[in-house]
Image (spheres, grey):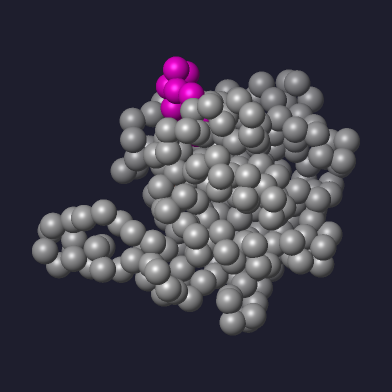
């Protein structure tokens, strides 16, 4: 089966480029299931019910979160009715759950969202937590496991690869909004340190450059905003899994609103 993973979708520009390209991409590449990160969907902070339904309507099937999962409080209720998860290493009392179990073309699939520690809100140790969760899923017979590692540091994400690669199908980094070029298939596990944002590409992490620049130049911050006008990009990884949950093939696509496409093939590695 063929799946796609889209990183952090940032604001209206992100939603617009998804609307423009995702339905045709699903047909062209025969994609069975699409996962995306929702933490910046609604004006850059969190996810509203309206925008959740909008994205599901464009062909996204399930969504992962991060440190901005709670920015729109209506999400507390949405976890019960929509295919949404939040990092699994938040305290148990937090709304929502960190694993989504679904059936895709007869395969039992688990999607896990986990958050790194470096510069992130206080949470449980992500490595110990995910190690336990993956062990449990394997005991239950789940072979198709897809992980969103929402983290700032590249080392934490790479450490996740080495901890999990023989046991999970794919690991996708999110949160930095800056895509990396290190797509690989290691021991049958698809990995990229960061998929990168979907939204404005000519500002700073999808946000209007004015406030971040002001903060860096003066030390005085302000509220980050989505640019009114910008040049956009849609970034996604398309990956094919076999019956045992191993990745057969993967490629990363950067689709520009100029119609240009940059492709990166997943290099097969034996680590
Ligand atoms: Fe983000
Ligand atoms: Fe984040």
Can residue 270 be seen here? The reply is: no
Toward the viewer: 232 or 49? 49
As drawn, 177 above or below 88: below
- The rendered magenta stretch, by its main secondary structure, is classed as loop
The image quarter containing residue 164 is top right
As drawn, 270 above or below 260: above
Residue 120 is situated, as x and y percent measured from the top left of the image, at: 35, 40
Residue 91 is situated, as x and y percent measured from the top left of the image, at: 43, 22
Magenta stretch: give its range.
87-95
Q: Is residue 182 left or right of residue 28?
A: left
Toward the viewer: 94 or 162? 94
Q: Is residue 249 left or right of residue 121?
A: right
- Residue at 82% x, 63% y: name it: 27
- Asked if the stretch drawn in magenta spans residue 92, the answer is yes
- Asked if the stretch drawn in magenta spans residue 97, the answer is no
As drawn, 211 above or below 121: below
Can residue 81 be seen here? The reply is: yes
As drawn, 243 above or below 269: above
- Residue at 58% x, 23% y: name it: 132
- Residue at 58% x, 76% y: name it: 257
């Amino acid at each position: 089966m063929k799946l796609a993973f889209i990183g952090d979708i940032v604001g209206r520009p992100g939603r617009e480029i998804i609307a423009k390209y995702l339905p045709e991409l699903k047909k062209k590449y025969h994609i069975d299931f699409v996962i995306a990160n929702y933490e910046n969907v609604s004006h850059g902070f969190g996810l509203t019910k309206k925008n959740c339904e909008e994205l599901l309507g464009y062909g996204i099937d399930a969504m992962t979160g991060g440190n901005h999962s709670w920015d729109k409080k209506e999400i507390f209720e949405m976890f019960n009715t929509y295919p949404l998860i939040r990092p699994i290493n938040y305290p148990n009392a937090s709304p929502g759950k960190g694993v989504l179990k679904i059936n895709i073309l007869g395969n039992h699939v688990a999607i896990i969202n986990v958050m790194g520690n470096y510069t992130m809100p206080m949470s449980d140790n992500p490595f110990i937590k995910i190690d336990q969760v993956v062990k449990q899923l394997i005991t239950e017979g789940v072979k198709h496991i897809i992980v969103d590692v929402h983290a700032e540091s590249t080392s934490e994400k790479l450490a996740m690869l080495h901890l999990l690669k023989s046991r999970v199908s794919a690991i996708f980094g999110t949160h930095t909004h800056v895509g990396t070029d290190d797509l690989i298939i290691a021991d049958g596990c698809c990995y990229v340190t960061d998929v990168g944002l979907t939204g404005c590409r000519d500002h700073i992490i999808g946000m209007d450059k004015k406030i971040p620049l002001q903060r860096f130049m003066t030390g005085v911050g302000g509220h980050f905003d989505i640019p009114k006008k910008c040049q956009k990009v849609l970034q996604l990884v398309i990956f094919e899994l076999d019956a045992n949950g191993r990745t057969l093939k993967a490629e990363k696509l950067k689709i520009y609103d100029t119609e240009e496409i940059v492709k990166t093939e997943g290099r097969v590695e034996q680590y």
